Amino acid sequence: MKAGSIMPEDDLAAQAREVLRHVWGYDGFRQQQAAIVQTVASGRDALVLMPTGGGKSLCYQVPALMRPGTAIVISPLISLMQDQVATLLQLGVRAAYLSSSLEAHEARAIESQLLDGRLDLLYMAPERLVTSRTLELLQRVPISLFAIDEAHCVSQWGHDFRSDYLGLSVLAEQFPNIPRLALTATADLRTRADIIRLLRLEDAEVFISSFDRPNLFYRILPRLNALEQLTDFIKREHSQDAGIVYCLSRAKTEKVAEALKARGFPALVYHAGLPAAEREANQTRFLREEGVIVVATIAFGMGIDKSNVRFVAHLDLPKSLEAYYQETGRAGRDGLPSTVCLFYGLQDVIKHQQMLAQSEGSEEHKRHERRRIDAMLQLCEATDCRRQLLLRYFDEHMAQPCGNCDICVEPVATWDATEPARLALSAVYRTGQRYGVEYVLEVLTGKRSERVLGNGHEQLALFGQGQSVALKTWRSLFRQLLAKGLLLVDVDGYGTLRLAPECRGLLKGETMLSLRQDRDTVAGARSSSAGRARASAQVDSADQPLWLALRARRRELAEAQGVPPYVIFHDSTLLAMIEHMPLSLREMRQIGGIGDSKLERYGDEFLAVIRQHVDEVA
């Protein structure tokens, strides 16, 4: 499989296609994959920005099989290494990982394989690689390339900074002639600059693929009763599907998971506070069983390569668009239709502004974080195509609305909120800019509570003037005033509101204000994603028995080997079997995703299922 030496430039493209076809079973590369593979295979450095599910791993795995020596892959999480290695072994690729989870004798055996030239790829964490022992070990063997996955972790401006990545500059110093490939799914201009500077990739060729994930349906809704909204969403669109639900706190993940289980959903919890054994068991069950839902903090996800996650839901506002993009990107990695849904509320805005106000970082850091929060809020409060706005953040232009987000499917209505907004701002000012939203609402709606009476605010001329406006409309208005920067949250930690300088024109009657009208429920957004975001929805009713039979055989084979089902075949490959109905190994070989090794291992197994189905319906 390995090339004995680096081939001439003209032959690299043909060789790469040959490796792709025989190992992975695909006839051609996607987008910029071919150019990246050729760059690295020819011995040059590269920086790759490619969306989750866009095929980043092929960009180093293919050249690893083209160049002599062992490819060293730096990955931040053990679970990610394990998943990648399990997948490669299924393809007949000689792969292993070194991590703290291994016993000493297991690690020694893998090091022996490395020294003997019996590995095509070896995965390890950055903290292991930069030790003097590992560097000395790598100096003794031929290295084909270094791949630095999740490269945004090197930047303090990135959304997942890890100090261990800073030591990876040693690769440029000690292995100057070995090509290095840095890969990430999310990095703004500042983070990209950090990756290049800190990893010494000044001469690297930069490849930026489209950040668009056209198979994802984006939806953002006001959070009213999050649990009921989430349950309704899952029942309507993903009742049998695997999904991830993100919450901000550990306590909330446990509460939501228990509530989903009580409603009959196979829900598990995942957060850093769980015992390691329970955390690992829950992750393993999610990977290996169909239709399991994980309710998690952001501690869960980076190492998850499960291809058929059909939905990702957020019950709290992500801290940035980079984080949102990364987390939602765990849905639909196989390219099949999937849904991402965010339930977002007034308290999210207050909480994020409080955290920013209380930050001890430099003013430059605060400005940077404020821009990130503002961008996230703009996506939530958008009145035009969400995908266009999201891509614009990553410096990508989409000429036309996507047609696959809630706003495109059902355009947002707006209303003239000028007078209610002036009344709200006046109430904040007249009460001394000393209270939070709930107190100001009591004054606006004329509630004679003990504290309102105690402060004498029932004597204000505006007391009770907001009674004609529904309470949920007031909450929406305050949320949008905060999101637009017309109101600010004070640094006291109590959610105290104060006027922003930008509201002066509105208060003086110099400007008007138009706000979006919120939709209340999942059903309120007449989404075209409903009922089609499952792979099974793409199967005709007549073929449902075959679909279930193929999935059952896949599950049996996976359980026998102790690997996740998608490592055997992705859902998209099973769907292709249903579409083409191969009845011989030669015909099976023409289906994408079935390379030489998998054809030999599983071809007859799945042909038997198809033939039985054909006989039964004949």
Image (cartoon, helix red, strand yellow):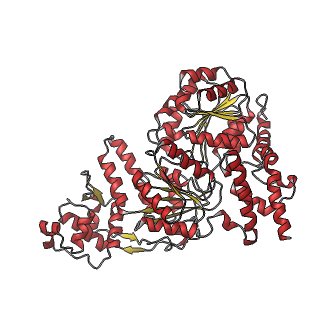
User: Which residue is pictured at 57% across the width and 26% down the height?
Assistant: 172
Q: State how many labels appear.
A: 0
User: Which quadrant of the view contains residue 515?
Assistant: bottom left
Is residue 248 rendered to the left or right of residue 234? Answer: left
Along the line of sight, the residue nearer the viewer: 201 or 324: 324
Is residue 299 rendered to the left or right of residue 461? Answer: right
Residue 505 in the image: state x and y as whole percent. Answer: 28, 64
| Residue 394 visible somewhere in the drawing | no
User: Which quadrant of the view contains residue 361?
Assistant: top left
Residue 307 in the image: state x and y as whole percent. Answer: 63, 53
Relative to 57, is 429 above or below? Answer: below
Relative to 135, is 29 above or below? Answer: below
Q: Which quadrant does the C terminus fall into?
A: bottom right
Along the line of sight, the residue nearer the viewer: 614 or 414: 614
Residue 44 in the image: state x and y as whole percent. Answer: 66, 32
User: Which quadrant of the view contains residue 75?
Assistant: top right
User: Which residue is pictured at 42% across the width and 71% down the height?
Assistant: 518
